[in-house]
Image (spheres, rainbow, N blue to C red):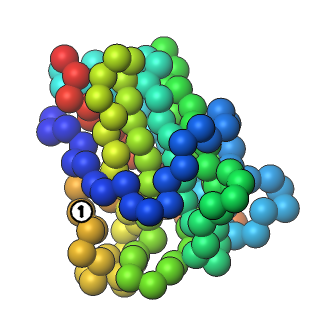
Amino acid sequence: SDPTPDQMEGPYFKPDSPPRTSLVTSSTPGVPLTVSGYVFGRACKPLTGVLLDFWQADTGGAYDMTGFAFRGHQFTGADGSFTLRTIVPGLYPGRTRHIHVKAQAPGRPVLTTQLYFPGEPRNTTDALFDPALLMNVRSAGPGREGTFDFVLDVA
């Protein structure tokens, strides 16, 4: 399948995020969200050890620029899988809901992109929105579960 499209990094990226698969605790405000999926190469082969660095706004639409709230990185497992525990990001002016991510296979260039939520009213007005980057999202108890598979331009 086609490689995952790239998107602009935006003004809120910070390097050196902590290694963690959960960006929340039990007391974090917001709608719980689990995002999971796989990272594949062009030949549909799962890619192990891919760096995934996620960052997003809090439930109020703010990014933490002093610390590392709602920022973290992880590596795909032997089967190419990843799981991120977070919350549904809040809205801020000019954008629809989204989660930022950088994906980098070992020794390869970084893919910088964003993941989007289906059915968001602002998807139609956000100039950056790309339907190829829509997660599949379903309700799960009090929260939501999203899935997305990345395809990197790796043989």
Residue 58 % position (x, y): 64, 68
Residue 55 % position (x, y): 54, 53
Q: Quadrant of the N terminus?
A: top left
Instruction: Look at 30% across and 22% down and name the residue there.
Output: 108
Crowdedness of circle 1 by 10 Å Cα count: few (<14), some, many (20+)? few
Instruction: Look at 40% across and 75% down and name the residue there.
Output: 96
Q: Can you name the residue that lies furthest to the left here?
A: 2
Instruction: Look at 71% across and 54% down and name the residue there.
Output: 67
Q: Quadrant of residue 38?
A: top left
Residue 8 % position (x, y): 30, 57
* Above or below, comparing residue 90 to residue 44 in the picture: below
Q: Is residue 143 visible?
A: no
Q: Quadrant of the C terminus?
A: top left
Relative to 12, is 129 on the left or the right?
left
Helix, strand, or loop for circle 1?
helix
Number of marks in the image? 1
Q: The residue under label 1 is which amino acid type?
A: Pro
Residue 41 % position (x, y): 25, 24
Mark 1, residue position = 131
* Above or below, comparing residue 73 to residue 23 in the picture: above
Instruction: Look at 24% across and 75% down and name the residue there.
Output: 127
Q: Nearer the viewer, residue 70 or 65?
A: 65
Q: Nearer the viewer, residue 75 or 132?
A: 75
Relative to 92, is 1 on the left or the right?
left
